[in-house]
Image (spheres, helix red, strand yellow):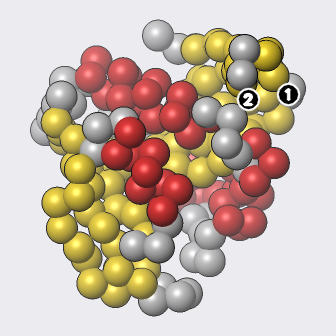
Amino acid sequence: MNEYNVGIHQNGEYIMEYHIRAMEERDVPYVSQIENEIFSLPWSGKSFIDAACNPDNIYLVCECTGEIAGYCGMWTVMGEGNVTNVAVHPSYRRKGIANALLKEMEKRAKEKSVTIFFLEVRQSNEAAKKLYEKLGYSPIGTRKRFYEKPVEDAVVMSKTL
């Protein structure tokens, strides 16, 4: 499946339609803009291009009203998926976009015979940890001082299909 379209509804009310598809080189300037706005040590545009062009990887974007609202990425190898990126532009948060991106990424990973997923999340990022737990991820350990700017531990989480 190359594309995924759905309408976002909140309290029974239609809010917007979004479109999830594979990340392409033309998306990288918009992805980089979100990356630079959110993260203290952002990936370079070249890193996204290289990752998205690798056929073993899964990199997706979510378009809303013609804009890139969010993106996610995963490296896959030998049945394992390592979630490397999940980000939603601040103006599109709390609308189910990260949830939809992760579900679509997991679906595509399953097609590549991935049966276990791993990710790291900042210890202080309660919203992300709550989302991952809702999707079935469980904490399995800690990576001390994993993040920089500011230095912070990472919670390692895993999900098995």
Spatial CA span between label 2 and label 1: 6 Å
Q: Is residue 86 above or below residue 107?
A: below
Q: Quadrant of residue 32?
A: bottom right
Q: Position of residue 2 (x, y in %)?
A: 53, 14
Q: Is residue 154 above or below residue 26?
A: below
Mark 2 residue crowding within 10 angstroms, few (<14) / some (14–19) / many (20+): some
Q: Position of residue 69 (x, y in %)?
A: 73, 40
Q: Amino acid at mark 2?
A: Glu
Q: Which numbered circle lies on residue 63?
A: 2
Residue highlighted by disc 1:
66
Front residue of this view, candidates 21 and 86: 86
Q: Position of residue 55 (x, y in %)?
A: 38, 33
Residue 18 visible in this rendered orientation of the protein:
no
Q: Position of residue 28 (x, y in %)?
A: 69, 47
- Helix, strand or loop at label 1? It is loop
Q: Residue at x 28, y 45 (%)?
A: 137
Please give left or right for residue 44 compared with residue 93 in the image.
left
Q: Residue at x 73, y 29 (%)?
A: 63
Q: Which numbered circle lies on residue 84?
A: none
- Helix, strand or loop at label 2? It is strand
